[in-house]
Amino acid sequence: MWMPSSRAISMAMLQAAKTEASDLVYDLGSGDGIIPILAAQYFGAKAIGIEYNADLVELSKRHAVRAGVADRVSFMKADLFQVDFSDASVVTLYLGESLNAKLAPRLEQLRPGTRVLSNRFDLGSWRPDQVIAHVPNELAMLWVVPARVSGRWRIPADIGLESDAIELVQSHQVIELRIINQGLPHPIGEGKVSGSDIEFEIQRKHAPSLRLKGTASPDGKRLSLQTDSGLDRSQVPLIHWDRI
């Protein structure tokens, strides 16, 4: 059953995503086309609506022509589970709890930094980075796809740990840091990932805790980090961790 998104919540979602002209917006279950049309009208973005109901697809096309954005917006009748939307920088959806749950693994495999927004329904265990609740009687959520950093990383000898490697265990945007000592994992810190940005704090036995911030490389094989010391970032040397 089609559930239309209001103009107010649609605009709030696009604003929360910081949508701009360089974005490609996919609306999964696009209904009457309001989100793709607003994305083009007010943010200059290109947008694609995916909708299974052929009548709604035709209605959306007429709305796009009337709004003067038919050159930046397209709509297709398709099963959203069969569509490749891996080139999206923004994905919006208003589908329902069960469809969101099925889509969540695919959404989390999108490029780091892709913004995902859902009207009303969450993505299960993947907690939102932001709740959009300022529209009366409506609710939406924003997720930023995190870089995939799980695994073992080689670390510099002078970092103050009794190991030359560290393991990152990732659950969505949350990470736990561990070292392997005598064959057993020992938690030593935690942090978070947002897009390619990563930050965490390491608890050290014989030194103060160490806060690091930085980015994951596009290929996921290197972390470029700096100590969070309060100094101008340009004065703080980079530390590189390489994936093992």
Image (cartoon, grey):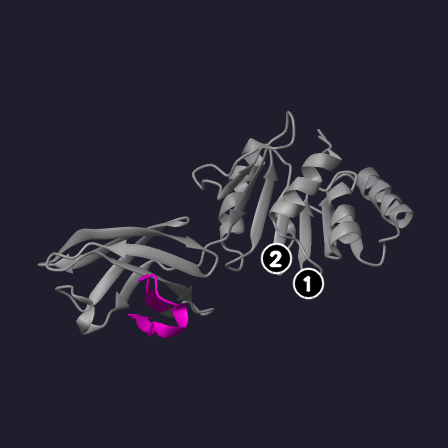
Decide if residue 149 is on the left or right side of residue 5: left
Residue 26 in the image: above or below residue 162: above
Q: Nearer the viewer, residue 8 or 54?
A: 8
The circle drawn on residue 186 is: none
Mark 1 residue element? loop
Q: Residue furthest top?
A: 137
From the viewer's perspective, tell me whether residue 122 is left or right of residue 78.
left
List the single residue furthest toward the left: 182
Inspect this view and state whether residue 156 appears. yes
Q: CA distance from mark 2 to mark 1?
A: 9 Å
- Which residue bears the numbered disc 2? 89
Q: Position of residue 233 (x, y in %)?
A: 39, 68
Observer able to see residue 75? no
Q: Position of residue 174 (x, y in %)?
A: 37, 48
Residue drawn 66% across the image and 53% down it:
19
Name the amino acid type tagged 1: Ser
Q: Position of residue 29 (x, y in %)?
A: 69, 41
Query: Residue 231 colored magenta?
Result: yes
The residue under the point 27% across, 63% down is 152
Tell me the magenta residue range.
Answer: 224-244
- Measuring 62% from the left and 61% from the top, which residue is drawn there? 87
In this picture, is 193 found above or below 227?
above
For the N terminus, the quadrant is: top right
Tell me which label, 2 or 1, sits earlier in the chain.
1
Asked if the magenta segment contains residue 174, the reply would be no
- Which tag is nearer the camera, tag 2 or tag 1? 1
Residue identifier under label 1: 22
Asked if disc 2 and disc 1 are in contact, CB closer than 8 Å, the reply is yes
Q: Position of residue 169 (x, y in %)?
A: 30, 53
- In the picture provided, is 71 more to the left or to the right than 48? right
156 lies left or right of 70: left
